[in-house]
Structure formats: C-alpha cells, structure tokens
Amino acid sequence: MNLRIGENLKRLRREKDLTQEELAAHLGISFQAISKWERGESYPDITILPALSNYFKISIDELVGMEEIKRAEEYEKINKRWLENRNNNLHKENVKLMKDALKFFPNDALLLVQLSSSLERLDGTDAEKMQYLRESISVQEQILRGEDSEVRNATLYNICFAYWKIGEHEKAIKQAEKLPNLYKSRENALVYLLTGEEKREIAKSSLEPLAWSISHQLTALYETENDKNYLVKAEKIREMLLEIK
C-alpha cells in the first residue's frame, strides 16, 4: 500500500504558508524529519499522526490518503478485469465495464481508450458494427479534447482508421495529417539525448516499429508502381532490423 502522507503533508503545509522549520517547531520535532516524510523516505511514527491531524484539522484517514488509496486500488482492479475480458473476447462486458467505470473516473484517458477499443471489437450486423464504430469515434473525439498528449497522439492515429472504415475518407486523411512526422518522434529525440544502456535500449526498441514503417512505405510503392522489387527490399529490411532487435 502506497501511503500518501508525504505529498499530503507538503500540500497542507504549503496551504498554511509554513516552512518545514515552522511546522517542526509547532510539533516539537526536527525539520529534517518532516523533510524525509515529504520526500517519501520515511513515514511519521504512528504516535505523531494524531498531532498532525489535529494541527491541520483533518482526519488521520485524510492525512494518510486512504480515499486516494482505495480509488487507486479500485482503478487497478477495473483495468485488470478489462484486460482479462479482452483476452477472453468478452468485449460487450468490457463496454459496460468501462461505461460504469467512467461514472467514477470521468474523462479518464485510459478508460476512454479502452472503451473505444472495446466498441470497435463488438460483433453484430453490418449496421450494428457501423453504429459501434460511430460511438467509438465519438469517444475518441472526447479523448482528443483532453490534455494527455501521448494518449491524444495514439487516439489520433486510431481515429484515422475508424473514419476510414465508416467511409469518411476525407476526415481520415485530415486527422492523419495532424500526426507528427517520422523525424519528430519520441524515439528520434531520446536516442540523441540518452547515453549508455538507456541509449541502447531505446535504439533497439525503435527498430521494430521502424521496420514495419519502412515495410509499409515500400509496399505502398509496390502497389502504386507494380514493381515487386519493393516487396523484396521490404522483406530484407524487415528481417535485418528485427534480427538486430
């Protein structure tokens, strides 16, 4: 269990505009102890919790962060259940699970992504599948209005294909044009900024998506120029890069 005493104590202290030394003086302890608590290096002795809760006029549960801990545990259980359902192709159950979860965790980016993904996996008639796709697009548009840039980029990529599947090709292309190009990617930046083992790991982890990206582009050239040499080159490059990885 990850107690939240340190971060709560820091927040409460700053709300009262107190330094660590001033708070320590009120409690009759050293400021070094408070510094360690706030950095998460140690926890207050159980005997001092009542003094802290009385001083800040909150319950011990609030100080410890029991509500946040319970919410985090519930959130973890929900996501674990979603993964189990997905592995068992229980996508209808996952749609309900995510919709119920979003009532308690509104606008949560991960839950919205998982709802969108589950909707697109639902089976049914062609008309029903089209409706599920449209609902998924609506969810993804909600994600794109959020602030999580990594989730937004992943969603932006996915929504291109959702629009394409329902026949709205212009919208698909318009969204695709908003995606970052290959040069301005996270991997290209990190491989220059990191050193040693971290640099090696990011370089190797980048090879698989790079292999498939090159393969896609060469396949596109084959389809437009009808030259099978592109397919041969794509296969060779894919094998070489994946072998290195």
Image (cartoon, rainbow, N blue to C red):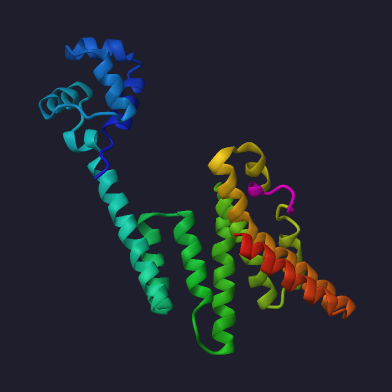
Q: Position of residue 221 (x, y in %)?
A: 84, 72
Give the quarter of the image for residue 23. Answer: top left
Residue 114 lies, with reference to residue 183, above or below; the image says below
Q: Does residue 157 appear anywhere in the picture? A: no
Q: Is residue 12 magenta?
A: no
Q: Position of residue 19 (x, y in %)?
A: 34, 13
Residue at 58% over, 75% down: 133
Query: In the rendered view of the protein, which quadrant contains the C terminus?
Result: bottom right
Give the quarter of the image for residue 3. Answer: top left
Total tally of numbered discs in the picture:
0
Q: Position of residue 114 (x, y in %)?
A: 47, 65
Is 209 positioned to the left or the right of 42 in the image? right
Q: Please name whichever residue, 58 or 31, is drawn nearer the observer in this view of the structure.
A: 31
Query: In the rendered view of the protein, which quadrant contains the N terminus?
Result: top left
Residue range in magenta is 181-187
Residue at 56% over, 49% down: 201
Residue at 54% over, 84% down: 128
Q: Residue furthest left?
A: 47
Give the quarter of the image for residue 152. Answer: bottom right
Q: Residue furthest bottom?
A: 125
Please name the predominant secondary structure of the magenta segment in the image. Answer: loop
Q: Position of residue 220 (x, y in %)?
A: 80, 73
Q: Does residue 17 appear anywhere in the picture? A: yes
